[in-house]
Image (cartoon, coloured by chain):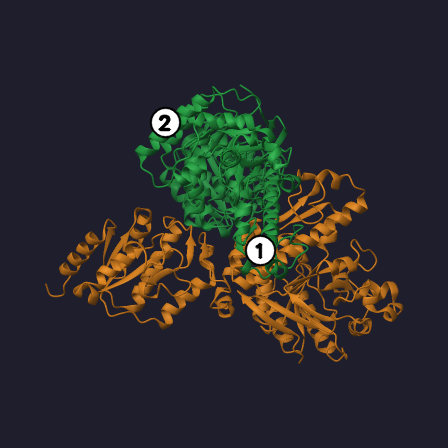
Chain colours: A orange, B green
Amino acid sequence: MRDCFEIVDKDLLGRVGRLKTRRGVVETPALAPVINPGLNVVPPREVAELGYGLLMTNAYLIKRRYGDVALEMGVHGLLGVETPIMTDSGAYQLMEYGEVEVKPLEIVEYQVKLGSDIGVILDIPTRHGVSRETVAREVEETIRRAREALEVDRGDMLLVGPVQGGVYLDIVARAARELAKLDYDIYAVGGPVQLMENYNYRELVRLVMTAKMNLPPGKPLHLFGAGNPHMLALAVAMGVDLFDSASYALYARDGRYMTPHGVYRLEDLGDLPCECPICSKLSVDELREMPYQERVYRLALHNLYVLRAELRRIRNAIREGSLWELVELRARSHPSLLQALKEYERYVAFIERHHPVARGVVSGLFFYDEVSRGRPEVYRHLHRLRERYTPPPADALLLALETEVKPFSRFGWIAELAKAVAGDALLRERVHVVVASAAYGVVPLELDSTYPLSQYESAIDTDEPRVAAALASDVAWFVRGLGRYRLAVVVYEARHEAAAVEIVKRLRRAGLRAFLRPFTSVGDTLAFLKLVLALSQPHT
Amino acid sequence: MRDCFEIVDKDLLGRVGRLKTRRGVVETPALAPVINPGLNVVPPREVAELGYGLLMTNAYLIKRRYGDVALEMGVHGLLGVETPIMTDSGAYQLMEYGEVEVKPLEIVEYQVKLGSDIGVILDIPTRHGVSRETVAREVEETIRRAREALEVDRGDMLLVGPVQGGVYLDIVARAARELAKLDYDIYAVGGPVQLMENYNYRELVRLVMTAKMNLPPGKPLHLFGAGNPHMLALAVAMGVDLFDSASYALYARDGRYMTPHGVYRLEDLGDLPCECPICSKLSVDELREMPYQERVYRLALHNLYVLRAELRRIRNAIREGSLWELVELRARSHPSLLQALKEYERYVAFIERHHPVARGVVSGLFFYDEVSRGRPEVYRHLHRLRERYTPPPADALLLALETEVKPFSRFGWIAELAKAVAGDALLRERVHVVVASAAYGVVPLELDSTYPLSQYESAIDTDEPRVAAALASDVAWFVRGLGRYRLAVVVYEARHEAAAVEIVKRLRRAGLRAFLRPFTSVGDTLAFLKLVLALSQPHT
């Protein structure tokens, strides 16, 4: 087993990595622009010079067009670059045209001879709308070919094993588990082109996550044919390290102009909303009035700049630990991406296991709404409270709804209240101060300086019924789990009233004597607390 | 009254416009980079050559430093450009230092003599945390000065009248109404620097919207000191046409690197996530290791490129009618911007009156969640249903929950159902087919091809309690308003069950005989409908 992949940084399931090929290291996440061997929209050398450390071309098309003549020049000679090159095997053509004129082993051997740095086996891509039986049979054939292909002496060429199965997730899982047993350098998820063309990113999440969960976590993962910049961040958050796409050129030929948050038609643009070397020198009219070939060339370059910048943004986000924020931002590029993000959140237990504990750059987490609560930090916090937490011995809960100043234990009235409780001999023994946070649910005050429990900015409205219900349910779960509180006082500012009411309801249902108390002053709250404690003395 | 402003395109309250100054037309929305007359981080000529059509400098500082000597060169001579220049009057210095060494009329006259293209009166900026009485007194003084300043012969110089008042919205409204009576070329909203430094964008929305609603809608509006790219789209959506900011330079001196969705510290970046002419030629290490002055110069240029691109993006969005989408996207740059957007939605009735009926480019509207439902198209649709709608004569409502294919009247099972109803003599007379849409509430099927009722993509979950409740309430409101239905059948796909249940509850409370019916087939639904109609015949 060759170890060709080094993981440098992690965030969610995404990683910044180094993929070692015989022609040098490829920094990941990377997108390999697809070079059509017969028709270069942008010359391969220029693509490489833009900083694309990996190119993709099609060994099957090369074989058909040039046959063994190509073997003399090698794929690097053909494209005129020394950059690492990945070659495809004709599987896409198999999907498009139903058959290819090459045998599975033959095309692997051809890729080796062509000097490809990364080769792909001739798998059978799952098409959309095909019956379960057919897909199951095709996947078995792909697995068979994957076993067989390992017998080819591939020398220094890295080999990719594609997971297929489409919407049949049990088949996807089986394919991934079987391939995981084989010594592949790189794994891939195949056949999502139709899903992506229809913006069916929710289904794509199911497919990629199912594959990811069943593949060796340390191996690089490739996603075939993903080239719309707005979905790259989410794909990386699922653990995708490599992309290949011809979108920069296909879009350019079709007059489509990429931006980080979506694709525009050139004729709809009044200004070029971009500062890349192409757009900063041209007006939109100049671009529109160019001869077709020149316009396509420049649009393709622009698209390559946009993709490059998005990949850099993603790498930065992984390093500083803000990939979640980037994914949430991109989820506002199209409603289907928000649906996909909600689907992604269903895998939080798996994501949390791989998500690092500390961020690269210490900065606050952003919480916008219920969707933000799906991030692994929230799951992790609640999970740890359940598994590992021992509260101080107290029978009364003083539950304060979060304030805008944080950490709660140091600033604002929650801190003052806690100080007053600690300074009172009676209260100190009996009262435990806990914060209800729209972001994290329940935060025992003695834990609140633990990262990231007070490092966040929140726009979550606690008066949204779902948020109030979630918060009340977190509090009730916490109280029931500990089983030690007999009474509770819920203190809150007016804007949190709806949530406070909901929490008190749930606490009463859980058997506590629970009281609502709008915050006015520390003295007032303390007096109320003492009154409540006195009235609820056992045996009085 | 001079007419210096032409509005070319509108979207929400934002506009693409042409501001005519004596030195040429400034295309708006525009941001005037602030040039410090004593210390240029980027030479003014270079700033102008980047395409910034308006520069800002400080007449008060020029007067203090150069006095009457500056009048010989004029402000254009001093800065070495022929670009239109706006000058500030020292009001910012008044706010910072409490006093200035110049009289109000004196500085207006000085600006005229300096050859400024746009001058500002010496108003009294409202500081943060100042008492209501003080603010009221200061605003009266600003209004007095504004009246007085109009007596100065300003020749071709355009004059700006600033609205002050800070968080005291009644004072802001009064200031705006009083200034609106005066013949100012441009109005401004003043003093939001502290609000913006604290990211208190919600308060900023209240301030700007209050001013906007009380100022002449056709006049250009300037917002002082707003230079963080992530908030420009929202400000433009409030009707702001002009900005000035030194942020490009101040951030650069502080090692801060702008992006469209936020500001980063240069030391936190692993890659430069930008394709501007600066960043596409440099690595982050090269930038970091430069001598301070060179780094500041390049960072400032980068920041200017980012601001320029954002302004172009905003202009494109206005032209194509997608400013709402851009504002919603930017609201995911920071939770405080989402809070601000929610505040902005409270002004929907005013926004709707100015929002154009047709979009520049016909494309679908995006709906993500409850926040998206705050857009003026939704308000407009429901308002029109209430005011102008006459339904066909029918006593039964067939309410279908939206499908993914649209328009509902042409595709999918809703269309088939409607066709079957229309083909049946009995049903045709008695049944009205209406769609419940998470985006628009209620859409009578005969209206659904009216723009934009079926041109949308939605990620709104109807099983969120707030959405289900809003939808049910829209349906009940529609039914009660018409007062003609006696019974209703609610047909739905499984994913909308929660909303369908809620709707039936509300319809029953409104006095209808309402029935739930999961959709299985057209025939089945029709049979059920007939059964229900038969059973509920009057007098049987």
Report helix, strand or loop for mark 1.
helix
Question: Which quadrant of the view contains residue A536?
Answer: bottom left
Question: Which quadrant of the view contains residue A454?
Answer: bottom left
Q: Position of residue A209 (x, y in %)?
A: 57, 65
In the image, which disc is placed on residue B435?
A: none
Q: Position of residue B300 (x, y in %)?
A: 59, 48
**Residue sitting at x 72%, y 78%:** A150
Q: Earlier in the sequence, mark 1 or mark 2?
A: 2
Question: Which quadrant of the view contains residue A233?
Answer: bottom right
Residue type, label 1: Tyr
Q: In the rendered view, does A363 fall on the left or right side of A71?
A: left
In the image, which disc is placed on residue B140?
A: 2
Q: In the rendered view, does B435 fall on the left or right side of B317?
A: left
Nearest-to-viewer mark from 1 and 2: 1
Mark 2 packing: few (<14 Cα in 10 Å), some, or many (20+)?
A: some
Residue type, label 2: Glu
A532 over B427 or under it: above or below: below
Mark 1 packing: few (<14 Cα in 10 Å), some, or many (20+)?
A: few
Q: Nearer the viewer, residue A351 or B498?
A: A351
Q: Nearer the viewer, residue B123 or B225?
A: B123
Q: Nearer the viewer, residue A244 or A357?
A: A357
**Residue sitting at x 42%, y 54%:** A457
Report helix, strand or loop for mark 2.
helix
Q: Position of residue A192 (x, y in %)?
A: 66, 60
To which residue does mark 1 refer? B292
Q: Nearer the viewer, residue A445 or B497?
A: A445
Q: In the rendered view, does A10 fall on the left or right side of B472?
A: right
